[in-house]
Each structure stands twice: as C-alpha cells, then as structure tokens.
Amino acid sequence: DAGITQSPRHKVTETGTPVTLRCHQTENHRYMYWYRQDPGHGLRLIHYSYGVKDTDKGEVSDGYSVSRSKTEDFLLTLESATSSQTSVYFCAISESGHQETQYFGPGTRLLVL
Amino acid sequence: SQKIEQNSEALNIQEGKTATLTCNYTNYSPAYLQWYRQDPGRGPVFLLLIRENEKEKRKERLKVTFDTTLKQSLFHITASQPADSATYLCAPSGGSYIPTFGRGTSLIVHP
C-alpha cells in the first residue's frame, strides 16, 4: 500500500465523543487526502493538505477538522461524533498535486453508536 | 456542479470476453482521467491515467479511451478473468479540480 498506514483500523465509539484518525506515510509525498466511502455515495473528499500546516476543505467537510504538523502525518478529527459519520475512511497521498496518481491506505472502519 | 456517472448496475460477463465500463462527466473539463480498482474491504488501487491529448492508453489487457468532446472515458479489459472481478472507479482530475471519484461499477467475471 505504497507506505501508507492508517490507525486505528477499526473503531466503535459513542455519539458525542471526539475521535481522531491518523494517516502516516513514508513516501514524503506533498499532498494528503481524507475521504469517506459510503454505499450509494462512493468516495467523497473531506479535507486535503498540500503541505505542512496547509489544508483545505473538500466536498463534505462539515463536522470534521484536520491537522498536519509533519509531512508524514495527517490527522482527521471528529470533534463530536454523530451516527451519520459512521463510514469507512480512507487516506490517500499524491506526490505533487491533484492531477497525480493517488495511493490509498487500507482504510478505517468507524461505527458511531 | 461537477458530476461523474458510472453504471450503477453490476456488469456480468463470461471469462474470456471483453468488459467495457463507461465513465461520463459533466460541468467541467478535466485534463486527466484516472481509473482505479477497488476490492472489497480495501482501498482503491491506481490502474491507468490518460491525458486529454491522448485518445487511447494501453497497459497489458487494459485499454482506456478519453473523448473530451463526448466527455466520456471507456475502460476495457480484454480476455477477462475471474480475478478481474472488482469495482472500478473513474476519477477525472487536473488543474484546480479537487479529486472527484465516480461511484464505481462492479464487474463480475464468471468462469
């Protein structure tokens, strides 16, 4: 999986609790992305980063925040999880821009009860 | 807004036949179009990228076409095998467009 890991791989949490998902890469790629994938919706971009401390919103950013303090780590935080955030979350990286090939991590399955 | 359409119904074909998957897009003009494969429980894996000035791209049994006039890409798998069974996603990209993926088409190759 091109040197991308996600943690945790599975998580069950309760509504209203904060949750942080971590994406770690060893490829030194500049761009990092967080997607969620749901039946009937496909992959939808939540947030992305184009460098350390440089982030921007994607299509479905409400209820999520991100941080990138090091090239290799991109964190996704659900400040107060809701049941609608139950999903599979994928991290992806690309070398230098949106037009580049994206390499995906193995995904995190999140269940919010 | 940008819209990407892929056949939502699964494509069932017999082993050895050619599978053809369609990706249509509207309301933007991407400079690139990428195809990915996704197996159940795993992240998408890149297969091919075609540029707007390329009409066709091949890699082993895979062929992709890109018609910027029709705003359509076709993805072909020749001599299909059961191992080709997966969901295939298209992703127009390029310029300032943020990455956007189609919902994918499920391909089932029967032995």
Image (cartoon, coloured by chain):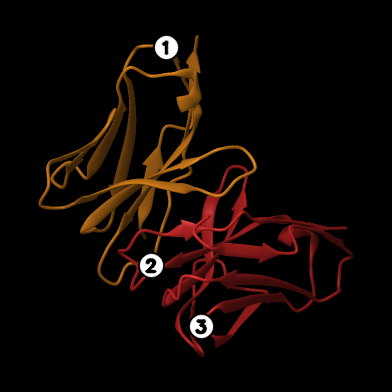
| Amino acid tagged 1 | Glu
| Amino acid tagged 2 | Ile
- Choose the circle earlier in sequence order: 2 or 1: 1
The chain that hosts pointer 2 is: B
> Residue at 32% of width from left, 63% of height from top?
A100
| Amino acid tagged 3 | Thr
Q: Which residue is mark 1?
A: B15
Q: Are marks 3 and 1 in contact (CB under 8 Å)?
A: no
**In the depicted structure, whether residue B5 falls above or below residue A103:** above
Chain coloured red here: A
Q: Residues within 10 Å of mark 2 (few under 14, many from 20)?
A: some
**In the depicted structure, whether residue B18 falls above or below residue A33:** above
Q: Position of residue A27 (x, y in %)?
A: 46, 70
Labels 3 and 1 share a subunit:
no
The chain that hosts pointer 3 is: A
Chain coloured orange here: B
Q: Which residue is mark 3?
A: A71
Left/right placement of residue A14 relative to residue A45 reads: right
Left/right placement of residue B16 relative to residue B69 reads: right
**In the depicted structure, whether residue B102 falls above or below residue A34:** above
- Indicate which label's residue lies in the foreground, 2 or 1: 1
Q: Position of residue A51 (x, y in %)?
A: 44, 84
Q: Which residue is mark 2?
A: B98
Labels 2 and 1 share a subunit:
yes
Q: Can see residue B10?
A: no
